[in-house]
Amino acid sequence: MYDAGALEIHHFDFYRLAEAGIVADELAEVAGDPHAVVVVEWAEVVQHVLPERRLTIAIAQTPEGDRDIRMSAHPDLAYLVEAIA
């Protein structure tokens, strides 16, 4: 956890994990905290515990070696996509 003033930032990285185990429970607990920003890398393994109301940023490498960045969000958070774009 990182302190960010009025908010806390929680970072979870599930790279190369086939099963999230007990960490999925920890993620589920903090994901509902209104004072927390939760950053999840390689989230496929924990899709079942992520809230519906979220901002998703997908980063992929193109065949040319560039980055393809795509954002999507719950309608309540659409303003974040607009602000970042």
Image (cartoon, helix red, strand yellow):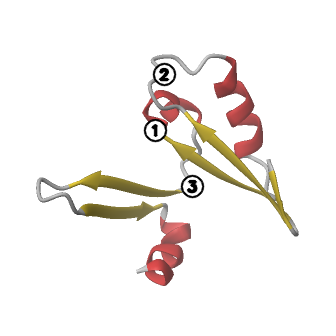
**Residue ID at (68%, 25%):** 23
Element carrying mark 3: loop
In which quadrant of the rendered view does residue 68 lie?
bottom left
Q: What amino acid is labelled 3 in the image? A: Arg
Q: Are marks 1 and 2 in contact (CB under 8 Å)?
A: yes
Of circles 2 and 3, the one toward us is 2
**Residue ID at (54%, 48%):** 52
Q: Are marks 2 and 3 in contact (CB under 8 Å)?
A: no
Residue 17 tag number: 2
Question: How far across and down, in percent of the image, does residue 57 sit?
Answer: 43, 58
Q: Disc 3 marks which residue?
A: 53
Query: Sequence order check: which comes first, mark 1 or mark 2?
Result: 2
Q: For the C terminus, which image quadrant?
A: bottom left
Residue extending furthest toward the left: 63
Element carrying mark 2: loop
Give the crowd class for mark 3: few <14, some 14-19, many >=20 residues within 10 Å.
few
Q: In the image, is 78 to the left or to the right of 12?
A: left
Residue extending furthest toward the front: 65
